[in-house]
Amino acid sequence: MVHNFSAGPSILPKGVFLEASKAVVEYKDTGLSLLEMSHRGEHFVEIMQEAQNLVKELLGLNDDFKVLFLSGGASTGFYISALNFLKTRAGYIDTGTWSSKAIKEAKRIAPIEVVASSKDNQYKHIPSIPSDLEGLDYLHITSNNTIYGTQFQDFQALKTKQICDMSSDIFSRPIDGSKFSLIYAGAQKNMGPAGTTLYIVNQNHLDKDIRDLPSMLDLSLQIEKKSAFNTPPVFPIYVSMLNLRWLKDNGGVEAAEKRNAEKADLLYAEIDRNSLFTGNVEHKDRSKMNVTFTLSQEGLENTFLDLCKQANIVGIKGHRSVGGFRASLYNALPLKSVQALVEIMTFLEQSHG
Amino acid sequence: MVHNFSAGPSILPKGVFLEASKAVVEYKDTGLSLLEMSHRGEHFVEIMQEAQNLVKELLGLNDDFKVLFLSGGASTGFYISALNFLKTRAGYIDTGTWSSKAIKEAKRIAPIEVVASSKDNQYKHIPSIPSDLEGLDYLHITSNNTIYGTQFQDFQALKTKQICDMSSDIFSRPIDGSKFSLIYAGAQKNMGPAGTTLYIVNQNHLDKDIRDLPSMLDLSLQIEKKSAFNTPPVFPIYVSMLNLRWLKDNGGVEAAEKRNAEKADLLYAEIDRNSLFTGNVEHKDRSKMNVTFTLSQEGLENTFLDLCKQANIVGIKGHRSVGGFRASLYNALPLKSVQALVEIMTFLEQSHG
């Protein structure tokens, strides 16, 4: 077996791939591939509804929340979130690459205030949320940074609206939906394959008349059209639905949180124990999804990568912007993959330390 | 076998479904599903390049043209095309639903002039393009209307820029790319499954400084990032690539045009011959992709639909906004499916005419 530590698109359960694969040839006993069916037909309408219901059920969301599967990735979400919520001024927490991009897109619409940043510390920690957020339309946070390997360990209930880009850790743990006006997340980590983006919107927090919005970027209109204003990305939504079913059958987000903690604890313990490796970020803000680390002894990088390759470990090179290593431990990654990686790290220390 | 006349998402070749299905379980001999691979890895980069090259090769486009596979459907294309090309005033040909929607999205940016329309004739024909288009940033046309069943039979070389929504007939016939500044097309007819949208851009006709553009809607930036500014919709692009390979292996767009003409001629001949059926649109503007027709004798609709069902013919109900029937004859639909439909029409006349 291959141990797939890719940061996204990333590992999904084998059973999901097998069932999705069947539907590409024939969906149920229809004689048709899922790919050649009308998105207005009963089969896909059922898939969409089940996917939306699973999101609400898994996250324990009440009926104030509407669930959309749109397209364009979180990069479109940066712009959509601001278009639909930003009137005069919004606050952003800057935790590196993804929040910087979110800030850039929002600034096209109205002024942005960076209310906290860990830039001066090379994004090695998650800054505190200031208590005074008065006058801001919302606070925007990125729950987990895939590149630096930092993560908000919990979320605060704020007096202002809270918008969260949860692309890389949604469905990895329970959340309290009532803290958020909008959560958005590209599918390709814990939800499904690339090609759809989840929007969880508290419909009471939307102002339909905020501005003249292009139809495809208008959350109120997309809610009205039940996430099918135009032809939705059928297959990515179907695979996401299958994966959410798998998550439900495996104890939901509560059980996922335990499994993810076990995997992260094992790997961080080895990083801290092993004299050759150093973790990149402050302990309190370490991400359970993306573990970033470096080799403290020079010249061993290729040896380590070769050993990983021999052990069928893939996807552990760090992001091109920061270097080093990154092991992504998304929901579908089994514990034995982490054990395999830890074995290599231990072996490297024994043979080269 | 099922005869799939769906208007989109629509039939693709069986071989494409089989190969795509395999990749969902394991791509080549990597031990990994295509869905769990990095979009920056060698495998997907190759897929993207092959898909882009196939578009250029099949349509005979020179290097002025850049090929992008974005997301959001043609509905996002309505807005993107105007955002990237509309400065002060543009002309639109109104041939019904899709062009009306394109006009609606463009109007958010600058004034639009409807330079020709067939609205007064219930969109039963394609209006002529006026000779005087001076002062317009571009002329926008919809090459084929899936709902009314009309189609531009050829394209004019204009002095002004020409933008075409070619969602429902791209790759069905040869085109002269030099007539267009931008062609865009949702994948889910002749190109692939739902979830990606093709943009063919003459890069010399783009003004990078036209306005402050959100990154995801900025064609110049998407060109610079080789259609991978963010994670592209991997699987829809892969299936599109497989389908374009199939088209190339089957004689390209020239052979497709002949096959499509044969299918359309057969069905229109039956509509004109059969006393029970009437074609919806003017003969000269009949679409070879979407054949729309009605029953001229009342009360036979359900009988006809039942007969179709018994013969495994699906997807021939007309669009909900116009009623009647619609048979979509996209590239992958075999002649024998049209023969099966014609047989039912003939049988209905013999038994109930």
Image (cartoon, coloured by chain):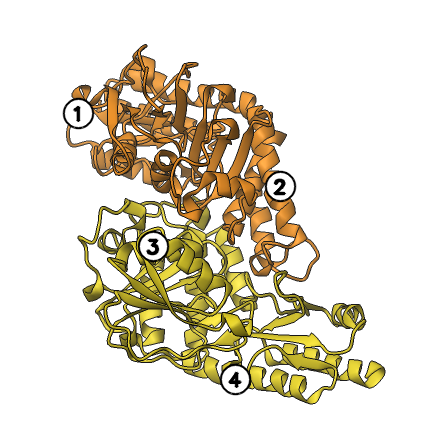
Chain colours: A yellow, B orange
**Count of numbered tags:** 4
Can see residue A237? no
For marks 4 and 3 on the same chain, the one whose residue lies earlier in the sequence: 3
Give the class, few, some or many, for how many residues have Cα within 10 Å of label 4's Cα (few <14, many ≥20): some
In the rendering, at what x and y percent does residue B35 appear? 55, 58
Cα–Cα span, label 4 and label 2: 39 Å
**Number of the front mark, 2 or 1:** 2
Looking at the rendered image, the disc whose residue lies closer to the viewer, 3 or 1, is 3
Assess whether mark 2 and mark 4 are in contact (beta carbons under 8 angstroms): no
Please name the residue shown 36% across and 24% down the image.
B138
Check disc 2 and report its element: helix, strand or loop.
Answer: helix
Labels 2 and 1 within one chain: yes
Q: Is residue B307 above or below residue B128?
A: below
Q: Give the residue type at disc 2.
A: Gln
Of the pair B253 and A76, the residue shown nearer to us: A76
Task: Report the chain holding disc 4.
Answer: A
Q: Disc 4 vs disc 3: which is toward the camera?
A: 3
Amino acid type at mark 3: Ile
Instruction: Give whichever of A22, A317 is nearer the camera.
Output: A317
Give the residue number, with chain letter if any, for mark 2: B49
Quadrant into which the N terminus of chain A falls: bottom right
Quadrant that contains the C terminus of chain A: bottom right
Q: Which residue is mark 4?
A: A261
Q: Position of residue B202 (x, y in %)?
A: 50, 28
Q: Nearer the viewer, mark 3 or mark 2?
A: 3
- In this view of the protein, can residue A148 be seen by the observer? yes
